[in-house]
Amino acid sequence: MTGDRVFKALADPTRRFLLDLLFTRDGRTLTELESELEMSRFGVMKHLRVLEEANLVVTRRSGREKWHFLNPVPIREIHDRWIDKYTEHHTTALIELKAELEDES
Amino acid sequence: MTGDRVFKALADPTRRFLLDLLFTRDGRTLTELESELEMSRFGVMKHLRVLEEANLVVTRRSGREKWHFLNPVPIREIHDRWIDKYTEHHTTALIELKAELEDES
DNA sequence: TTGACATGTGACCTTTTGGTCACCTATCGT
DNA sequence: ACGATAGGTGACCAAAAGGTCACATGTCAA
């Protein structure tokens, strides 16, 4: 269920950028997403397909257009796999500490 | 800083299994981790190196042994990249949307 | 109904990645 | 000091992934 595919999908920077685009504004067509990238339409389509098979993106067809939406559920499942709820607070504290240190430098 | 490497590191099932091992019991040497896998020592070492460069695993040397520890911070950062804490409840709405779309087709 | 538009498929090539091996260095116990 | 143990490097090969193209289907709008 939560298999390989999610992690493979996240492994590519172009696909992560596509997720970023949908995160800032959700619900976009292929051609619109393509216009934000240097890549050919076919490359973008291939990436979107990988994201969809990983269930990181869900789609809806409307006429000749296909709309893409970000689905954050698999991301949440990754989090839950290696972050114990008892130590979660500690992890958050570590991130905040890191942010502080980076601000100082 | 939190670049490519974390996602590339997570893309391989063997490396995820190594993280799982460290999640159940943290702090292990290469030889101990190797004994849990079918792979040769060199393969495991290569994977551990990738995890270490991704900062998902931190290490400490003690004599001729090298101890490996799980670092959950990068995982937490992945979560925070695409899951907005203020709109986290929208996740449920998306799941419902997906169900609707599947009913339509 | 005709042409422009939005998306889809399969073949193809190049680059990256996973895995093993021969060989090497350093440390422990006796 | 010595063998045994723990870890490390570079080369090498097979498999997988990224990207583009020729070609194809379905949909809108005048």
Image (cartoon, coloured by chain):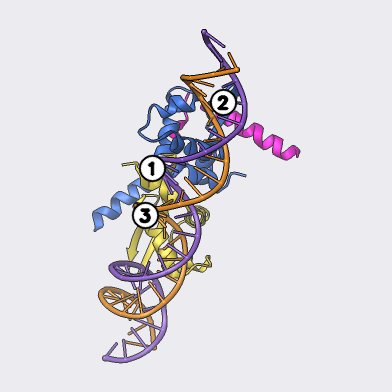
Chain colours: A yellow, B blue, C purple, D orange
- Which residue ends up furthest to the right in the rendered image? A105
Distance (Cα) linking label 3 and label 1: 18 Å
N-terminal of the two: label 3 or label 2?
3
Q: Secondary structure at mark 3?
A: helix
Q: Nearer the viewer, residue B40 or B66?
A: B40
Name the chain under label 1.
B
What residue range appears in magenta? A79-105
Does residue A72 appear anywhere in the picture?
no
The quarter of the image holding the N terminus of chain B is: top right
Q: Is residue A13 above or below residue A63?
A: above
Q: Secondary structure at mark 2?
A: helix
x, y percent for residue A54: 36, 50
Type of amino acid at the residue the image marks with label 1: Thr
Q: Residue at x 46, y 37 (%)?
A: B42
x, y percent for residue A58: 37, 54
Does residue A44 appear anywhere in the picture?
yes
Type of amino acid at the residue the image marks with label 3: Glu
Question: Mark 2, mark 1: which one is toward the viewer?
Answer: 2
In this figure, which residue is indicated by the disc labeled 1? B92
